[in-house]
Amino acid sequence: MAQTLPKPYKGPAPGTTSDVGHLLWTTLPSALWIGVFLVLPSLYLVGMAFMTNDSYGQPSLPLSTHAFGQLSGYGYLGWSPGNLQTLWCSVWYTLLSSGITALVAYPIAAYIAVCRPSVRALMILAVVMPSWINQVVRAFGWMNLLAPGTPLANVASALGFTTPELGLYPSSFAVMLGLVYNFLPFMVLPLYNAFEKMDYGLVEAARDLYATPLTAFRTAIFPQTLPGLMAGLVLVMIPAFGMYVVPELLGGGRAMMIGNLVATQFAEGANWPLGAAGALLMLLATLLGIIFLRRLGRRFGGGEEVVI
């Protein structure tokens, strides 16, 4: 008896109206979410930045670029470098904290990657667990640890960094310590993922060729962990640039960053257009930073694309 072959599928071909409709229905919820909670607030922020500040601090017509002039330092009393100094302070703290975080995270990630699987899970948990606590609570914890009379403050006083009646808080050092502490897990985890995928045979080959530890790191380890480093830098630099809690609590007004400037204009300063202009500056700096890191990763990665 002859075997009956199954009939071929005669459904809608790819690219037909039914296929396009199915694609629209599957992407509609995420598109609505992005549009309502990301695109519309961003458009409102852009419009607010080009409005005029009324006597009550609310944005109003006519449209103007006065807020951007104020952001660059021009006001009713002439030019003042205060806002530009705040911007430079934000850039400096972001770059320095990101570099220190990367230096601290590299040996931690490398050590976790070579540990036994059971110990590895516990160490990853120890790295991630502090980030489960609210940033304000962690900042208050560092305030207590760095206050006058604490062991850390006494050691700093004995070394001549501070006087006995002054602690390490509030200070720029406390702000830097808080930034590194807050964002260390965001650097360790991408680097750990890169170390797990690394070909250790290249490291052994470098050692067999009598390469120094620095040369072995530069030629065998760094190129393989570069994607993790680039991802970690993005995860650290973007929130660090707009950080508000750490400079506000640990800086005590001595280390104001762009996030504090924006928050002040929406609260005590009562100048919403200036705050919106500062927020747009943060978005632009974030976009330029990502583009720069992609090109930097492509250059050091031998022309290969580094996904960020």
Image (cartoon, rainbow, N blue to C red):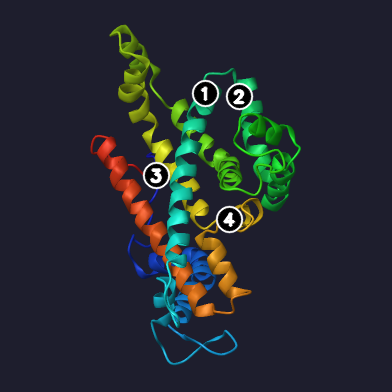
User: Which callout, 3 or 1, points at the residue further toward the start of the chain?
Assistant: 3
Q: CA distance from mark 1 to mark 4?
A: 39 Å
User: Which callout, 3 or 2, points at the residue further toward the start of the chain?
Assistant: 3
Disc 4 is placed on an element classified as loop
Q: Tag 3: residue type?
A: Thr
Q: Which residue, given by chain and number where applicable, does mark 3 sit on? A: 4
User: Label 3 crowding class (10 Å Cα cut-off): few <14, some 14-19, many 20+?
Assistant: few
Residue 67 visible in this rendered orientation of the protein: yes
Q: x, y (%) of residue 256?
A: 55, 59
Task: Please say if the residues under marks 4 and 3 sit with CB atoms less than 8 Å apart.
Answer: no
Judge whether 80 appears above or below 211 on screen.
Answer: below
Q: Residue at x 73, y 41 (%)?
A: 148
Q: Which residue, given by chain and number where applicable, does mark 1 sit on? A: 113
Q: Tag 1: residue type?
A: Ala
Q: x, y (%) of residue 64?
A: 39, 86
Q: Which residue, given by chain and number where applicable, does mark 4 sit on? A: 254
Q: Which residue, given by chain and number where applicable, does mark 2 sit on? A: 120
